[in-house]
Image (cartoon, rainbow, N blue to C red):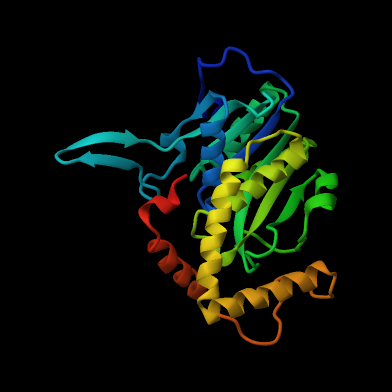
Amino acid sequence: MRDPEGLYELSAEVDEVPHGLHLIAGLTGFTDAGSTITQLSDYLLENLESRRVALFDADALLDYRARRPIMFFDEDHLAEYKPATLALYLVEDELHQPFLLLTGYEPDFQWERFTAAVLGLIERYQVRDTTWIHAIPMPVPHTRPIGVTVSGNRKELVESMSVWRPTTQVPANALHLLEYRLQEKGHPTAALVLLVPHYLADTEFPLATVRALESISAATGLIFPTDPLRELGREFMTKVDEQVSGNAELQRLVETLEKRHDSYMEENPLPSPFASLDGEIPGADSIAAELERFLATRPEGDDQG
């Protein structure tokens, strides 16, 4: 393997990184239900004090043809280019507690070398523990709290937070590999996987980001400002409820999902909260199409933030 340190460049912005910090990670790519990771990263970097510690080499890690960067065209010329970034930041929470944040695109290439590079940074800065966030679409109702599945070697978090503990195969995220390698080393690590209603997976769902921040706080003790996101979430939920109340098919779907969820949470002997009950329900594509049509008709100012 080529030198993992060749994948990134340390920034001159940060003279010294304190040792023993929490590392929070979230990468966009394969799946980002509710745009949870995108919103989380943007929200933290826009609302908290941050400085870049290391920038990864996109030319080595990113498939530009699969995820093309954005160029801005102004009438007769190209006015701006926004390259994709993957970087490690030193951030301060609301109480000015420092932590490290790894965020950006998920690498398309060189996963082993990328993982080795992150492991090297974790060792370099003597990171206390690593927590990463993932969000996947699941057939759960938006009328119930967003559930979390926890993996890793922090058993106290699994016991206190994990609502679903399947034995299954999953398509890997690059951070799954990092988690696996960290477990091998005995480094405290946890993955917090948010179970986002499948019919909201293609929207920007603010309450999923709130739940992500709450979960990170529970895992690390870090404190984040969430009031603006909560207000956006209330507005979003009001619009979704209006859409559902005006469509009998959507009502039937949500009611059935509620029964599944409540039966599972009451320790009914269902194998999972997603097991079938009597009767058919419309599929994810059907309800997603309905909500996409609804969201597309919102006034332009409704999606600010």
Residue 173 showing in the rendered view: no
Q: Residue furthest top?
A: 15
Give the residue at x 74% y 23%. Answer: 20
The quarter of the picture where the N terminus appears is top right
Q: Residue at x 75, y 63 (%)?
A: 166
Q: Residue furthest left?
A: 76
Q: Position of residue 203 (x, y in %)?
A: 49, 58
Q: Position of residue 38 (x, y in %)?
A: 52, 45
Q: Is residue 102 above or below residue 10?
A: below
Measuring from the top left, give residue 230's x and y in whole percent: 60, 48
* Of residues 35 and 168, the one drawn nearer to the viewer in this rendering: 35
- Judge from the rendering whether residue 162 lies leftward or rightward of residue 246; answer left or right: right
Of residues 296 and 54, the one nearer the viewer is: 296
- What is the total number of numbered labels drawn onto the structure image? 0
- Which quarter of the figure has residue 115? top right
Return the residue nearer the eye: 69 or 293. Answer: 293
Tell me if residue 28 can be seen: yes
Q: Based on the displayed image, in which of its 4 quarters is residue 225 positioned?
A: top right
Q: Quadrant of residue 179?
A: top right
In the displayed structure, does residue 127 sit left or right of residue 25? Answer: right
Residue 88, x across and y down, in percent: 56, 29
- Look at the picture and state if 18 lies above or below 69: above
